[in-house]
Image (cartoon, grey):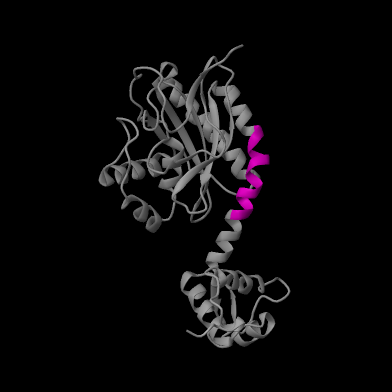
C-alpha cells in the first residue's frame, strides 16, 4: 500500500470550518464587498473551495450577492449574529444593578438568563440571591431545557417560529408534575406568554418553586430573560401581580442599556397554581437556609 505524500495527508475535519471563518473575516468596513476570485487570492485558497463555502453561507443568509456585480457582502444572518454577540457581551455589567434592585424589591432571587450558543437550552448568565433565610440558590452557568420554567419559556416564546417548532418536536423531558411535556399544550402556553408579555411557572423544574420572567427582545429574536424565583409559601396572586411590574421594570432598564426593548405586559390573569408541598431538590437549583 503506497504511503501518502505529505501534501496528500488527510485534512482535519475542522478545516472547512476554519476556512469558513477566514472567509467571513475578510468582510470589513474598509472593504465590505468581495468577489469569489478576490477572496481566493487574498486567502490563498482554491477558487472552487471558496465558491462552495460562499454558496453555503449564502443559503444560510450569512452573505448576500449583488445581482449585477456578483460580488458578496455580509448578509442579514451575520448582522443578527453580531448584534446578539454584542448584546450578550454587554449584558452582565449593565444587568447587575437592575438585578440587585429587583431582588431587594421582591425579596427573591433575581436571574438573568440567555440562550446557549446552540440555542436549545438556557444558561444562567447572572443572579442576585435574596438575603431571606429560605432561598433558591442558582449558580451562573446552570443550563435548563427551554420548555420548563419561567425564564426558559420567556426565551422560547419569543424565538423565531421555525426554531420554536424545531425544539418542540424534540422529546420534552418531565422534571416535576407541572412540567409541560405535550407539544400542543406547550404551543398554547407560548401563545399565552406572547399575549401577556411575561412567563410564569409553578413547580416545573423544582417542587416548591414558582417564578416569573420577562424577555428582552430585538426586532426578530429574543436577547435574554429577566426573572425571579422563590418558594411557594411566599406565593400569592396579589404578590405576583405586583412583582410582574417590578420584573418588567428591571427588564426594561436592561433593554434600554443595550438598545433593546421588552414586550408590553398585562397581569390581568395570573397563571400560577396554589402553594405546593414544600421545598425539594430538582434540576433548576437547590434550597438553602441562611446561617445568619
Q: Is residue 280 above or below residue 26?
A: above
The region drawn magenta spans 85-97
Would residue 180 be seen by someone viewing this image from the given angle?
A: yes
Would residue 259 be seen by someone viewing this image from the given angle?
A: no
Residue extending farthest to the right is 30
Nearest to the observer: residue 189 or residue 135 = 135
Q: Position of residue 146 (x, y in %)?
A: 41, 44
Q: Position of residue 86 (x, y in %)?
A: 64, 53
Q: Is residue 269 left or right of residue 138?
A: left
Q: Is residue 136 above or below residue 146?
A: above
Q: Which residue: 60% across, 60% down?
A: 82
Q: Which residue: 52% across, 53% down?
A: 117
Nearest to the observer: residue 267 or residue 190 = 190
Q: Is residue 251 left or right of residue 33?
A: left
- Magenta segment: does it hold 115? no
Residue extending farthest to the front is 1
Residue extending farthest to the top is 292
Quarter of the picture containing the C terminus is top right
Q: Is residue 127 above or below residue 35?
A: above
Q: Position of residue 95 (x, y in %)?
A: 63, 38
Residue 31: quarter of image:
bottom right
Q: Which residue: 59% across, 44% down?
A: 255
Nearest to the observer: residue 115 or residue 244 = 115
- Magenta segment: does it hold 90? yes
The total number of labels drawn is 0
Residue 74: quarter of image:
bottom right
Q: Main secondary structure of the magenta part?
A: helix
Amino acid at each position: 500500500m503506497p504511503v501518502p505524500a505529505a501534501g496528500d495527508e488527510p485534512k482535519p475535519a475542522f478545516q472547512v470550518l476554519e476556512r469558513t471563518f477566514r472567509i467571513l473575516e475578510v468582510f470589513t468596513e474598509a472593504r465590505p464587498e468581495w468577489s469569489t476570485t478576490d477572496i481566493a487570492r487574498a486567502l490563498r485558497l482554491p477558487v472552487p473551495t471558496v465558491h462552495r463555502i460562499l454558496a453555503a453561507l449564502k443559503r444560510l443568509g450569512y452573505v448576500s450577492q449583488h445581482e449585477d456585480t456578483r460580488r458578496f457582502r455580509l448578509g442579514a444572518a451575520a448582522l443578527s449574529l453580531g448584534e446578539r454577540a454584542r448584546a450578550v457581551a454587554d449584558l452582565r455589567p449593565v444587568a447587575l444593578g437592575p438585578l440587585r434592585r429587583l431582588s431587594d424589591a421582591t425579596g427573591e432571587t433575581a436571574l438573568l438568563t440567555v440562550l446557549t450558543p446552540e440555542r436549545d437550552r438556557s444558561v444562567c448568565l447572572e443572579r442576585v440571591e435574596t438575603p431571606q433565610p429560605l432561598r433558591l440558590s442558582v449558580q451562573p452557568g446552570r443550563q435548563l431545557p427551554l420548555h420548563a420554567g419561567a425564564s426558559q419559556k420567556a426565551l422560547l416564546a419569543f424565538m423565531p417560529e421555525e426554531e420554536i417548532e424545531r425544539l418542540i418536536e424534540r422529546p420534552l423531558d418531565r422534571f416535576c408534575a407541572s412540567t409541560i411535556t405535550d407539544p400542543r399544550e406547550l404551543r398554547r402556553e407560548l401563545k399565552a406568554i406572547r399575549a401577556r408579555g411575561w412567563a410564569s411557572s409553578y413547580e416545573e423544574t423544582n417542587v416548591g418553586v414558582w417564578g416569573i420572567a420577562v424577555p428582552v427582545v430585538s426586532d426578530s429574536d429574543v436577547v435574554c430573560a429577566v426573572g425571579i424565583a422563590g418558594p411557594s409559601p411566599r406565593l400569592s396572586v396579589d404578590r405576583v401581580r405586583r412583582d410582574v411590574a417590578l420584573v418588567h421594570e428591571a427588564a426594561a432598564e436592561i433593554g434600554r442599556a443595550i438598545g433593546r426593548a421588552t414586550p408590553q405586559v398585562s397581569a390581568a390573569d395570573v397563571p400560577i397554581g396554589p402553594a405546593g408541598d414544600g421545598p425539594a431538590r430538582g434540576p433548576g437549583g437547590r434550597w438553602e437556609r441562611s446561617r445568619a
